[in-house]
Image: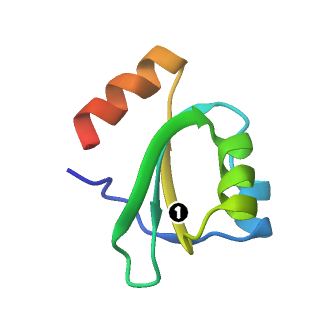
C-alpha cells in the first residue's frame, strides 16, 4: 500500500527541506502514479533522484534507522 501522504514537487526546494536522516520514499510521475520507491538518507537519495531520475513528485516518511526504514518499505510496497 502506497504512503498516504500528499505528493510534493521534486525540485531543489523540496530536496533542501528533506531531513538528513533515514526514511522510506516514493517517487511519482506527473499523474501521481508511483514509479519507484526505496530507502536511504532522504536528502541524499532525493538529490540523486532529482539529478538522475525522471520522477516529478516525491513523498516520504522518516525513520529512526536503516532497519526501521526497511520495515516501513515492507509495509508500503
Please provide percent x and percent y for residue 35.
40, 63
Judging depth in this view, the residue of 23 and 47 nearest the camera is 47
State whether residue 33 is above or below residue 62: below
Q: Residue furthest bottom?
A: 31
State the image quarter where residue 36 is shown: bottom left
Q: Secondary structure at mark 1?
A: strand
- Would residue 54 be found to the left or right of residue 44 on screen? left
State the image quarter where residue 72 is shown: top left
Please provide percent x and percent y for residue 19.
69, 42
State whether residue 14 is above or below residue 47: below
State the image quarter where residue 73 is shown: top left
The residue at 64%/41% (across/down) is 42
Colouring mode (rainbow / by chain / secondary structure / one colour): rainbow
How many tags in the picture? 1
How packed mark 1 is, by other alpha carbons closer than 10 Å (few <14, some 14-19, many 20 or more), is many
Please provide percent x and percent y for residue 17.
74, 55
Q: Residue furthest left?
A: 1
- Would residue 44 be found to the left or right of residue 28 on screen? right
Judging depth in this view, the residue of 15 and 33 nearest the camera is 33
The residue at 26%/43% (across/down) is 77
- Would residue 3 be found to the left or right of residue 59 on screen? left
State whether residue 76 is above or below residue 8: above
The residue at 45%/27% (across/down) is 69
Q: Which residue is mark 1?
A: 58
Judging depth in this view, the residue of 26 and 62 nearest the camera is 26
Amino acid at each position: 500500500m502506497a504512503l498516504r501522504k500528499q505528493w510534493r514537487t521534486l525540485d531543489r526546494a523540496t530536496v533542501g527541506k528533506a531531513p538528513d536522516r533515514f526514511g522510506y520514499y516514493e517517487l511519482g510521475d506527473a499523474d501521481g502514479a508511483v514509479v519507484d520507491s526505496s530507502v536511504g538518507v532522504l536528502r541524499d537519495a532525493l538529490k540523486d533522484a532529482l539529478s538522475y531520475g525522471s520522477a516529478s513528485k516525491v513523498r516520504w516518511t522518516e525513520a529512526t534507522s536503516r532497519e526501521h526504514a526497511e520495515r516501513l518499505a515492507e509495509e508500503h510496497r
